[in-house]
C-alpha cells in the first residue's frame, strides 16, 4: 500500500477524523526559474549543468545579485528549497575570480557543517579547480589544522569553534582575515535566546578582527521562516541586511493534520498519552515500509517514543533496530551513523528532538509525526518540512498533548494558519553575556580609548571595572589583557552551565555513552534515575557532582523516572513598571535558587505512578530577568465572598500563563518558568512571575511585559474552551496540583483583569 492509499484510508476513517481539528492541504507548486547570471564563470555553470541544475530558482538568482553587489543578505525559504546554492554560488564565483579570496561558513552543528561540506566539495570537484575547502572543528587533527589556517579558501566551522579556536588565535589565521570576502551563517533562526545573544557578540569580535586586518566581509545568511528575518539577521551581524523571501523552488502536495487525542476522563480533562498516540498513528505507515520521523519535545519523550516504536516493530514482525533515536547527548559517531542509515533507507523510523529540524541530509521522508506542538509556528513548519519530496505526496501530523499551549493551538487551527511565525528574540547587550565577550575581545586585541563594543555604550566603564579586578591594564590609551586565564574557554555559547556531566556506562567495561549540561543532569542523572539512551535503559548508580560524572549500568525495567525541580526567588529589582486594569505589571531582574527535590517512578505503557524517591544534590543559584503581575491585596477577600480562593486561582493562572506565553514569542516552553506567590516578600502583594530560565535573561521578560493584555486574552479563551469542570493539565492544572477552585478562581481574576485594551492589542497583533 502506497502513501496515497494510506491517506485515502485516513480520510475515510471516522474514528480518526473525529479527533482531527485541521486537515490543510498545500497544493503542489511548480518551480519558477531563470537563466544563469551573465557574469557567472563558465566552469561553474558547466559544473552545475553536469550536476543536473539547468537554471536557478528565482530566489537563488536574487540572492546571487545581492551578494555580488556587496549587500549583507538573508534568504528565507522553506526546507529543501535550495538555499545552499544561494551562498555557494557567489562564494565560488569570487574564489574563481580572485584566488586570494577567502570565505568562512558557520553552521550551528558539526553534523550540518559536515553535510554541507560534502555538497560544496562535490561541486568543486566537478569544476576541477583548486579551491581548497576544509572543515575546522574539534575533530580536525592538529597537523591538518596548520593546512587549514595557511591555505584554506573556504573554512567550514561552527560558532563554538570560531569563538574558542579561531578568534583567540587570529595571528595564525592572517591569510583568512586579510582576504575574508564572505561569511556564511546558515540556519539563523536557530540563533535565538541565549545562543543567538552569544553569537551576535562572537560576530562583533569577528568584525573587530577583520577591521584590524583591513577586510570587511559580506554576510550571507539563510533561515527558515521567522517573523523578523531582516531585523534578526541584522542584529546578529550588526549591520543592515537585504531580505530574499520569494521562493521559486517546486513543492509536492503536502497535508498538514492537527490531531487531538480522545478524552479518556472528561471530568479531569485527561486525554490519551500523546506519546502512545503518536506511535499508534505511525503504525500503519511502518507496516507498509513508509519511512517516518517523529519529533518529541524532550529527551525523555524521544526515548519513550523509541521504546514504543521498537515494541510496535516487534508486533509487526520487523526488526526493532529499524527504529532509532536522535537527540543531544548522543556521541557524534552515533549521530553520523543514524543520519547515514536514514539516507540509505536502513532506518524505518527515527524519533528526534528538534536536533533534526536543521537541514542535515537524512533523505526525503514521507511522513512526519509531532508528539506535541513544536512550541512555535516556525518550528512546526520546519519539522513538517522534513517530510516531503519536491514531487510526490507527504503528510505531517501534529498530535496535541494536554499542555495548554498544545490545546490552544489545536483548537485554534486558523490562528496557526493565519499568523506569521514568531519573532526571533536575542539580547546581545545582556550584561553577563556582553561582559564575557568583551573579555574575549580584549584578549584578542587591546581596546583603544573611546572604542565601543555593543550597542548600548558604556564600554569604558566595563573596561575600568575589569582593570580594577586585575584583568586589564590601561597604558598609552589602550586596555591590555593581563590575566592568566584564557577567557574563551570559560564561555559556553549554548548553555548557561559552563560544565557538562559525562555519562559513563559500567555494565561491561567503562565507556562514555553521552553527556549533558549541569541543569539537565539534576533531572536526568540523579542517583537511582532511569536514564534512557537509544531505547536502552540505564540505572544511575551515582552522580558524582564534584567530578561531573554519572555512572550507569544497563537494566531492563518496566518503568522510567521523572524528576521535579523546586525554584525559589530570593531577590528582585524592577527595571520598568506600569499600572494595569487589575494591579501592576513590571519586568526586571530576579535571583533564583533551583534544586531537584524528588522523582517519581512511572510505569511504561500505563504511565501510572508506582513509586517515588528523594534527590540529594546541591542547589544551583543564578540571576535572570522576569515579567511579573502584581494584583491588589484586597482580592483575597473579594474572592472569598464568592466562595473562591485567591491562592488556587494564582496557581492555576501561573500554570496557564506559563504555557500559553510561548505562543507569542519565539521561545521553547522550557525556556520559561512560572511561579505564583500569594504574598510576595518583594512586592508585598499577590504576584505571578514569568521568568527566563537562562542566567542574565535573553529578552523574553521585556517582550512579555509588552504583551500583558494579549496574554490575558489568550488565557481567558483557553479557560473558556476547556471542557473540564474543576481544572486539568490542559488549562489550570489538575485539582490535585492547583486546587478544586483553581479554574473558577482563575476565570474570575481574568474577568476582572481583561479590558478593551486586550482586544485592541490582539487586533493589532
Image (cartoon, helix red, strand yellow):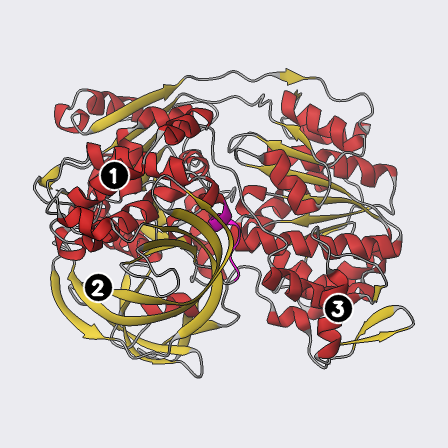
How far is the residue under mark 2 from the one under mark 3?
Answer: 50 Å
Q: Position of residue 675 (x, y in %)?
A: 32, 57
Whether residue 686 is visible, yes or no, is yes
Name the residue that disc number 1 marks.
Answer: 282
The tally of labels here is: 3
What residue lies at 19% left-to-right and 47% top-to-bottom? 638
How far is the residue under mark 1 from the one under mark 2?
Answer: 23 Å
Residue 560 has which mark?
2
Name the residue that disc number 3 marks.
Answer: 463
Q: Nearer the viewer, residue 155 or 336?
A: 155
Where 755 falls versus 743 (above or below)? Answer: above
Q: Closer to the camera: disc 2 or disc 3? A: 3
Precedes in sequence: disc 2 or disc 3? 3
How far is the residue under mark 3 from the one under mark 1?
Answer: 57 Å
Queried whether the magenta region covers residue 596, the answer comes back as no
Q: Closer to the camera: disc 3 or disc 1? A: 3
Image: magenta residue range: 696-702
Q: Residues within 10 Å of mark 3 (few under 14, many from 20)?
A: many
Question: Could you tell me which secondary element the residue under label 1 belongs to?
Answer: helix
Q: Is residue 592 left or right of residue 48?
A: left
Q: Residues within 10 Å of mark 1 (few under 14, many from 20)?
A: many
Where 75 falls versus 708 (above or below)? Answer: above
Q: Nearer the viewer, residue 382 or 465?
A: 465
Q: Closer to the camera: disc 1 or disc 2? A: 2
Residues at circles 1 and 2 in contact by the CB criterion of under 8 Å: no
Amino acid at each position: 500500500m502506497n502513501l496515497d492509499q494510506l491517506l485515502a484510508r485516513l480520510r475515510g476513517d471516522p474514528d480518526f477524523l473525529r479527533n482531527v481539528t485541521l486537515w490543510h492541504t498545500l497544493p503542489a507548486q511548480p518551480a519558477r526559474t531563470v537563466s544563469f547570471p551573465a557574469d557567472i564563470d563558465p566552469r561553474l555553470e558547466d559544473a552545475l549543468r553536469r550536476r543536473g541544475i539547468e537554471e536557478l530558482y528565482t530566489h537563488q538568482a536574487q540572492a546571487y545579485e545581492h551578494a555580488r553587489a556587496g549587500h549583507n543578505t538573508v534568504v528565507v525559504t522553506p526546507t529543501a528549497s535550495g538555499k545552499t546554492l544561494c551562498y555557494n554560488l557567489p562564494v565560488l564565483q569570487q574564489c574563481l575570480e580572485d584566488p586570494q579570496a577567502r570565505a568562512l561558513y558557520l553552521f550551528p552543528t558539526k553534523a550540518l557543517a559536515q553535510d554541507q561540506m560534502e555538497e560544496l566539495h562535490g561541486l568543486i570537484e566537478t569544476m576541477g579547480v583548486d579551491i581548497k575547502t576544509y572543515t575546522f572543528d574539534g575533530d580536525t587533527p592538529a597537523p591538518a589544522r596548520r593546512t587549514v589556517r595557511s591555505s584554506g579558501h573556504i573554512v567550514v566551522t561552527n560558532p563554538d569553534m570560531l569563538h574558542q579556536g579561531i578568534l583567540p588565535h587570529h595571528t595564525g589565521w592572517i591569510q583568512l582575515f586579510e582576504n575574508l570576502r564572505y561569511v556564511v551563517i546558515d540556519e539563523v533562526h536557530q540563533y535565538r535566546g541565549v545562543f543567538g545573544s552569544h553569537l551576535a557578540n562572537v560576530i562583533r569580535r569577528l568584525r573587530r578582527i577583520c577591521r584590524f586586518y583591513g577586510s570587511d566581509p559580506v554576510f550571507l545568511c539563510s533561515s527558515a521562516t521567522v517573523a523578523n528575518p531582516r531585523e534578526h539577521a541584522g542584529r546578529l551581524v550588526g549591520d543592515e541586511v537585504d531580505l530574499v523571501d520569494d521562493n521559486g523552488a517546486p513543492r509536492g502536495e503536502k497535508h498538514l493534520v492537527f490531531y487531538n487525542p480522545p478524552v479518556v476522563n472528561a471530568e479531569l480533562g485527561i486525554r490519551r498519552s500523546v506519546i502512545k498516540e503518536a506511535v499508534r498513528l505511525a503504525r500503519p505507515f511502518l507496516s507498509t515500509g513508509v519511512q517516518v520521523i517523529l519529533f518529541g519535545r524532550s529527551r525523555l519523550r524521544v526515548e519513550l517514543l523509541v521504546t514504543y516504536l521498537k515494541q510496535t516493530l516487534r508486533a509487526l514482525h520487523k526488526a526493532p533496530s529499524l527504529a532509532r533515536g536522535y537527540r543531544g547527548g548522543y556521541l557524534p559517531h552515533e549521530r553520523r551513523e543514524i543520519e547515514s542509515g536514514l539516507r540509505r533507507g536502513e532506518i524505518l523510523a527515527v524519533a528526534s528532538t528538534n536536533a533534526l529540524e536543521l537541514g542535515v541530509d537524512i533523505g526525503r521522508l514521507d511522513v512526519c509525526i509531532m508528539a506535541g506542538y513544536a512550541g512555535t509556528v516556525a518550528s512546526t513548519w520546519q519539522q513538517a518540512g522534513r517530510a516531503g519530496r519536491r514531487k510526490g505526496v507527504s503528510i505531517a501530523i501534529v498530535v496535541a498533548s494536554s499542555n495548554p499551549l498544545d490545546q490552544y493551538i489545536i483548537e485554534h487551527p486558523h490562528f496557526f494558519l493565519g499568523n506569521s511565525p514568531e519573532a526571533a528574540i536575542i539580547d546581545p547587550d545582556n550584561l553577563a553575556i556582553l561582559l564575557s565577550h568583551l573579555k574575549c575581545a580584549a584578549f584578542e586585541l587591546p581596546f583603544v580609548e573611546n572604542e565601543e563594543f555593543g550597542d548600548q555604550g558604556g564600554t569604558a566603564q566595563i573596561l575600568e571595572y575589569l582593570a580594577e579586578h586585575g584583568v586589564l591594564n590601561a597604558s598609552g590609551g589602550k586596555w591590555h589583557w593581563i590575566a592568566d586565564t584564557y577567557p574563551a574557554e570559560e564561555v559556553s555559547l549554548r548553555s548557561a552551565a559552563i560544565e557538562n556531566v559525562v555519562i559513563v556506562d559500567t555494565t561491561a567495561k567503562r565507556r562514555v555513552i553521552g553527556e549533558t549540561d549541569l541543569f539537565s543532569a539534576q533531572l536526568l542523572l540523579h542517583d537511582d534515575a532511569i536514564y534512557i539512551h537509544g531505547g536502552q535503559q540505564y540505572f544511575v548508580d551515582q552522580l558524582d557532582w564534584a567530578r561531573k560524572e554519572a555512572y550507569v549500568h544497563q537494566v531492563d525495567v518496566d518503568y522510567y523516572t521523572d524528576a521535579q525541580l523546586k525554584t525559589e526567588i530570593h531577590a528582585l529589582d524592577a527595571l520598568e513598571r506600569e499600572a494595569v486594569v487589575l494591579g501592576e505589571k513590571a519586568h526586571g531582574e530576579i535571583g533564583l535558587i533551583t534544586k531537584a527535590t524528588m522523582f517519581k517512578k512511572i510505569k511504561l505503557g500505563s504511565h501510572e505512578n508506582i513509586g517515588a524517591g528523594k534527590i540529594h544534590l546541591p542547589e544551583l543559584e543564578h540571576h535572570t530577568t522576569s515579567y511579573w503581575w502584581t494584583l491588589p491585596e484586597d482580592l483575597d477577600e473579594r474572592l472569598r465572598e464568592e466562595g473562591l480562593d485567591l491562592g488556587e486561582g494564582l496557581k492555576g493562572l501561573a500554570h496557564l500563563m506559563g504555557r500559553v506565553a510561548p505562543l507569542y514569542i519565539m521561545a521553547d516552553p522550557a525556556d520559561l518558568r512560572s511561579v505564583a506567590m500569594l504574598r510576595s516578600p518583594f512586592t508585598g502583594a499577590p504576584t505571578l512571575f514569568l521568568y527566563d530560565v537562562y542566567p542574565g535573561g535573553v529578552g523574553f521578560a521585556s517582550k512579555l511585559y509588552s504583551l500583558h493584555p494579549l496574554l490575558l486574552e489568550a488565557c481567558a479563551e483557553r479557560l473558556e474552551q476547556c471542557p473540564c469542570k474543576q481544572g486539568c493539565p490542559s488549562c489550570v492544572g489538575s485539582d490535585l496540583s492547583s486546587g478544586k477552585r483553581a479554574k473558577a478562581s482563575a476565570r474570575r481574576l481574568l474577568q476582572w483583569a481583561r479590558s478593551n485594551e486586550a482586544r485592541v492589542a490582539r487586533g493589532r497583533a
